[in-house]
Amino acid sequence: MYIGKLIFSQVMDFIPMHTFRRCVTRYQGNYNVKSFTCLDQFLCMAFAQITYRGSLRDIEACLRAQSHKVFHMGIRGNVSRSTLADANEERDWRIYADLAISLIGTARKLYQKEKFLEDLDETVYAFDSTTIDLCLSLFPWAKFRQHKGAIKLHTLLDLRGNIPTFIYISGGKLHDVNTLDILPVEAGAYYVMDRGYVDFERLYIMALASAFFVIRAKSNFKFHRIYSHPVDRTTGLICDQTIMLAGSQSCKDYPDKLRRIKYYDEETNKTLVFLTNNFTLQALTITKLYKCRWQVELFFKWIKQNLRIKTFYGTSENAVYTQVWIAITIYVLAAIIKKQVNMKISLYTFLQILSVSAFERVSLNQLLAECDYKSDTDISSNQLNLFN
């Protein structure tokens, strides 16, 4: 019988503690803290994410019910909802943001050799945002509309492994296109975006940085056709054109040539128009790139369904940001474990298993194995085996 670490502790072992301590020191997270440290706070919040706890009272009740195992989880401080609430209010959320960014770097290295498209070796990113609704009476700092509060989670998703590489949390009033000003641009990479990010001045800056964009065009933009390339209409392609913008302001914002691709999608029965500054890829590959943008929508749906970012344990801005960043940390940590342990199951299944096995004392590899571990020893034999 395995009598080693708890499953929760085995999962937390994948957190680089030296990096975590540096993050805590950077923002003086443990300054004047006597008992309930940043590590205690992080472990309690990670436990809440993994086991789907609904409130601070819920976290306290579950951990106190297993009080004889709390020490083995790595939690040294006394767990109470008031102490945890104070920690979420006062400990700088940037501690956990920096930890998540460090884990993102680790995950990207693990997934960098994943195949995405056969005829494309460059990195492809999907950029989008999702709105997290908040009650305005409880979160007055997050005013979105007259009677509604919200924050936005802006995410740049690396489509090799679906790892978020850039995350920015803003108020609900910030327009999506403004986040292009702070988006890190990588030369030679592809950025796939929806038409909400059409701003030709910002897109031209991206093109000058030697990056490529694929974006859905708005229906009212004006252009001049320079040349039409031949297309195979049996594939759904309608046209592949080289154009120049013709609007009085847009032609100044983007004075260079663009590529316009029109495509009929049989699955959705829609005709879509794409703009890109790449003239070398096949037109059908451009349409495939845009289809892959849906992965960022699935990412948002996944984290909302499987992590606690729709209901919050605190009402301050710091508490909300702390919870969101720790949720992202758990997502990336699950992706790292999936790759390092070579799991055949999905992240959803993995988190479902963890949610009911956090206090079990069983090997993580055995827990995730698809088949049961059975001994080949003859049970009728009285002879004990010294070596297995």
Image (cartoon, grey):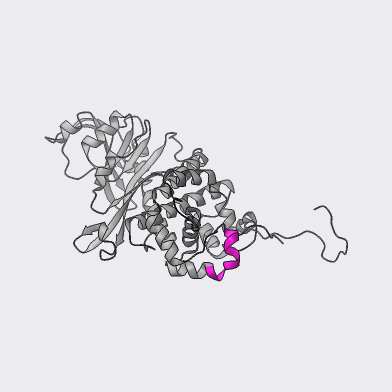
Question: Which is nearer the eye, 149 or 373?
Answer: 149
Question: Which is nearer the eye, 59 or 90?
Answer: 90
Which x, y percent locates residue 251? 16, 32
Residue 275 falls in image quadrant: top left
In the image as oriented, which residue stretches furthest toward the left? 248
Question: Which is nearer the eye, 98 or 345?
Answer: 98
Q: Would you place residue 350 above or below residue 220 in this image?
A: below
Q: Would you place residue 198 above or below residue 255 in this image?
A: below
Name the side, left or right, on which 298 lies relative to 112: left
In the image as oriented, which residue stretches furthest toward the right? 383
Q: Residue 88 in magenta? A: no
Q: Would you place residue 204 above or below residue 221 in this image?
A: above
Q: Would you place residue 5 above or below residue 194 in this image?
A: below
| Residue drawn at point x = 15 percent, y = 38 percent | 222
Q: Residue 70 in magenta? A: yes
Image quadrant where one finds the N terminus:
bottom right
- Report whether residue 299 is seen: yes
Name the side, left or right, on which 294 lies relative to 254: right
Which x, y percent locates residue 372? 67, 60
| Residue drawn at point x = 55 percent, y = 61 percent | 353
Give the extent of the magenta segment.
64-73
Question: Which is nearer the eye, 306 or 64?
Answer: 64
Which x, y percent locates residue 350? 53, 57
| Residue drawn at point x = 56 percent, y = 54 percent | 11
| Residue drawn at point x = 13 percent, y = 35 percent | 249
- Report whether residue 241 is seen: no
